[in-house]
Image (tube, rainbow, N blue to C red):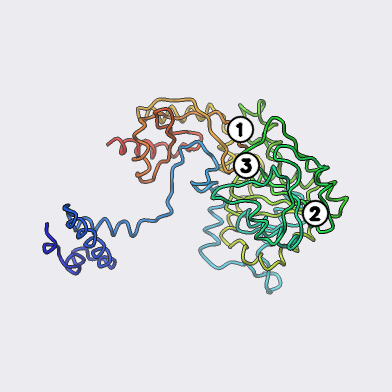
């Protein structure tokens, strides 16, 4: 094909009979000209227009089947929502709501009222506040309580998490000044005691996301830090990160005796942290809590109110859909056994490995793959040392890329020359779709 053989935009678009066809035709013809000049053949232009139109209408945020074995997978959207949260999303999202309207008085209300009561009940806190993510909750707490003043943080907690997000940067943006205490591996209560000065505003404890310092290491307990803070009249703010509401076994039953207690101690709950003396506790809604992305602050009523009245709170506040999904998730925690069954994250964490093996065996039978023993991870920065026994269906390594191009995409793990479909993060209802994707990928 030569340049003069190309049809006009109008001619090519008319064949598609689509309101987006003119733009698609322009794009196709521009690419065709480049290909002809480079000595190539542009192929069937009408088919390419149809492909452009299909791509223009294809959603970019798509459902994905998680076969990685990482339960709280940040790149794959973290926690899948329970059905109760999805029902609340639909109910509130499809119509008007009383987001900031008091139905009893007929006056303006607060959006925080919708989840504050249940958060108080579940954590034992005096008050609660919800913003759009946990980084926002820490930023708001520092801005409201320590702007222009000093904040004490252990050197072992000056962390960087995903996407180059660093705690010192958050402190700087809040207007607070960082004072480092202790060392990377060992920080004691006495280090905080010595660092307190006239300009100290608060003590901040930060969740060590995605790593642990082991061996010759030490850090004070929450109770010890709370005692230091109380002696100097300072608030203790604890960024828990992962969002465990109550002390509970977070690993599968077959690992509970061996590692369950250590895991609980490694991820303290909001309830026990407040009981130990923390004044404010910040944590995520979409990690171990198993709900939507949110930053939750619970603690002393006076401090929470200072956060609520700070100008940043309006910029960081959660929207009605977040609050609806969070309320739907929190409601399940009123019945702990129901929460373990119906919140996907908790169900995957606690499912016996025998059930995971049975799922892997079924998938292997459907695909002609082989069952392989593997290890799943919690993810989301939580319990980085925990290894959850799991089973995967192993198929050919070269299927990993075409599986990601299927509908829905299947994201697996390539390890030691095999593509592993970890069945701890796949539900029973996913298996037929995964099997069909394997068949298409082979085709």
Q: Earlier in the sequence, mark 2 or mark 3?
A: 2
Instruction: Report which quarter residue 417 is drawn in.
Output: top left
Q: Nearer the viewer, mark 1 or mark 2?
A: 2
Give yes or no for contact between labels 2 and 3 (Cβ–Cβ under 8 Å).
no
Residue for point 46% across, 36% down: 428
Local secondary structure at mark 3: helix
Q: CA distance from mark 2 to mark 3?
A: 35 Å
Q: Earlier in the sequence, mark 1 or mark 2?
A: 2
Residue 407 x/y as whole percent: 36, 46
Q: Callout 1: few (<14), some (14-19), or many (20+) C-alpha neighbours within 10 Å?
A: many
Residue assigned mark 2: 235
Placement of the C terminus among the 4 image quadrants: top left
User: Does the image show residue 327?
Assistant: no
Marker disc for residue 386: 1
Marker disc for residue 112: none
Q: Callout 2: few (<14), some (14-19), or many (20+) C-alpha neighbours within 10 Å?
A: many
Q: Earlier in the sequence, mark 1 or mark 3?
A: 3
Q: CA distance from mark 1 to mark 2?
A: 32 Å
Q: Nearer the viewer, mark 2 or mark 3?
A: 2
Residue 170 x/y as whole percent: 65, 56
Q: Callout 3: few (<14), some (14-19), or many (20+) C-alpha neighbours within 10 Å?
A: few
User: Does the image show residue 414?
Assistant: yes
In depth, the one of 152 and 60 nearer the eye is: 152
Marker disc for residue 338: 3
Residue for point 47% across, 37% down: 68
């Amino acid at each position: 094909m030569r340049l003069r053989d190309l049809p006009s935009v109008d001619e090519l678009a008319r064949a598609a009979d689509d309101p987006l066809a003119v733009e698609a035709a322009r794009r196709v013809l521009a690419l065709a000209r480049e290909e002809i000049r480079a000595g190539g053949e542009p192929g069937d232009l009408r088919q390419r227009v149809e492909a452009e139109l299909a791509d223009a209408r294809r959603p970019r945020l798509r459902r994905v089947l998680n076969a990685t074995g990482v339960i709280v997978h940040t790149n794959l959207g973290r926690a899948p929502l329970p059905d109760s949260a999805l029902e609340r999303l639909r109910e509130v999202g499809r119509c008007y709501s009383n987001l900031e309207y008091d139905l009893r008085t007929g006056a303006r209300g607060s959006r925080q009222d919708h989840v504050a009561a249940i958060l108080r009940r579940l954590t034992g806190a005096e008050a609660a506040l919800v913003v759009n993510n946990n980084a926002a909750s820490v930023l708001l707490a520092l801005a409201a309580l320590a702007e222009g003043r000093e904040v004490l943080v252990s050197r072992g907690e000056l962390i960087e998490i995903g996407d180059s997000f660093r705690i010192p940067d958050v402190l700087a943006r809040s207007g607070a000044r960082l004072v480092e205490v202790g060392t990377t591996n060992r920080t004691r209560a006495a280090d905080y005691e010595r660092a307190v000065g006239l300009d100290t505003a608060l003590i901040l404890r930060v969740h060590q996301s995605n790593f642990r310092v082991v061996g010759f290491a030490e850090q004070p307990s929450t109770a010890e830090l709370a005692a230091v803070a109380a002696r100097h009249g300072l608030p203790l703010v604890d960024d828990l990160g992962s969002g465990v509401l109550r002390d509970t076994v977070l690993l599968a039953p077959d690992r509970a005796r061996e590692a369950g207690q250590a895991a609980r101690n490694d991820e303290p709950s909001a309830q026990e942290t407040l009981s130990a003396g923390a004044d404010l506790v910040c944590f995520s809604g979409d990690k171990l809590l198993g709900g939507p992305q949110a930053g939750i602050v619970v603690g002393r009523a006076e401090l929470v109110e200072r956060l609520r009245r700070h100008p940043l709170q309006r910029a960081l506040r959660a929207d009605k859909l977040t609050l609806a999904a969070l309320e739907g998730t929190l409601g399940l925690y009123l019945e702990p056994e129901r929460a373990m069954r119906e919140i996907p994250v908790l169900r995957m964490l606690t499912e016996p490995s025998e059930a995971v093996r049975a799922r892997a065996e079924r998938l292997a039978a459907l695909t002609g793959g082989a069952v392989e023993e593997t290890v799943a991870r919690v993810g989301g920065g939580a319990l980085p040392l925990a290894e959850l026994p799991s089973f995967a269906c192993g198929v050919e390594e070269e299927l990993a890329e075409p599986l990601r191009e299927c509908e829905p995409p299947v994201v697996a793990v390539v390890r030691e020359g095999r593509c592993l479909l970890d069945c701890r993060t796949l539900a029973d209802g996913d298996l037929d779709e995964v099997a069909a994707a394997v068949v298409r990928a082979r085709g």
